[in-house]
Image (cartoon, rainbow, N blue to C red):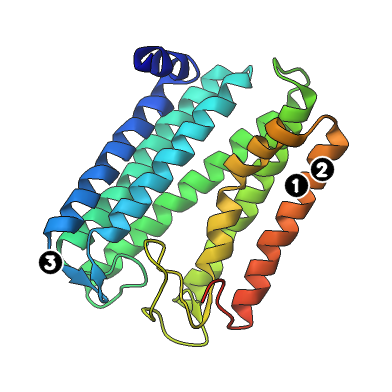
Amino acid sequence: MLNNFFEYFKTKNELLFSYSILCLAAGCICLILSKYSSLQVTGLNAWTKPFKFFISFGVFAFTMALYVVYLDNQRQVTNYCWSFIIFSSIELLLITVQASRGKKSHYNIDTPFDRVIFALMGLSLIVVLIHTIFIITLFFTQSQFDASDEMILAFKLSLIMMVLFMLQGFVMIKLFKHTVGAEDNTPGIPVLNWSKNYGDLRVAHFFGMHALQIIPLLTFILANTKRDVYLISLLYFVFVTFTLFQAFQGKPFIR
């Protein structure tokens, strides 16, 4: 049964599917390291951040593997897959390097080496973002899909929302922090570490990015018409936007 599961998803997009498995495996290794390592970064185990990023990139790759199979221009899809794998791997490698050094990976310009790493991380994500936007345009220029109109609409709307809240990451870079009302590293909720006492811009970033999974899932469960898809997407967008305004007001998402 497990073999059938893997074979099914490999037929969707073997490159991204295989990469997602590697990321999830690396995330599990980081989780194990966090249980046995005493290395700390800003009061948290150093391997917590690599764990979260490996899982996040793995889920993203897995989801895109399901979506891009519906595009006719598979040559461009293959180019995108390799671009994503190369540049996201650079990002993940640099985060892991900084964790192993007991250093912050984000917003760290303490030394010339740290500044180079932070700059390379930013450049890598910009390449991923630009190429992802290009792939999204293919969903809007292609006229026929081997899927229901409702599901393709859900893909399109979730991809737009994902990009919008990917761009929100540049707000955090401009502010050079993600906490509103205090400096970073205030007490946070378990695992995600969102601030329990102040606004945290990572909340909207998280939910906006995961529109990619949530909107199509809700469409599959609840939607019967395109109107349903628009309503689901609108309500989800309102929810994510609310969390963003809440953060800018310095209010925590969860106390």
Q: Is residue 230 above or below residue 49?
A: above
Picture quadrant of residue 140: top right
Q: In this view, does 215 lie above or below 31?
A: above
Q: Could you tell me if the residues under marks 2 and 3 are in contact, i.e. CB atoms within 8 Å?
A: no
| Residue found at x 31% / y 49% | 92
Callout 1: 10 Å neighbours few (<14), some, many (20+)? many
SS for callout 3? loop
Label 3 sits on residue: 38
Q: Nearer the viewer, residue 179 or 88?
A: 179
SS for callout 2? helix
Residue 168: where, in percent of width, then height? 58, 63
Residue 101: where, in percent of width, then height? 15, 64
| Residue found at x 64% / y 82% | 249
Callout 3: 10 Å neighbours few (<14), some, many (20+)? few
Q: What residue type is labelled 2?
A: Tyr
Q: In this view, does 175 lie above or below 140?
A: below
Q: What residue type is labelled 1?
A: Ser
| Residue found at x 47% / y 73% | 178
Note whether residue 205 is visible.
yes
Residue 220: where, in percent of width, then height? 69, 31
* Mark 2 vs mark 3, CA separation in Å: 48 Å
SS for callout 1? helix
Along the horizontal axis of the image, is 118 left or right of 195?
left
Picture quadrant of residue 146: top right
| Residue found at x 54% / y 26% | 66
- Number of the label disc, if any, that sits on residue 230: 2
* Mark 2 vs mark 1, CA separation in Å: 5 Å
Label 1 sits on residue: 233
- Number of the label disc, if any, that sits on residue 168: none
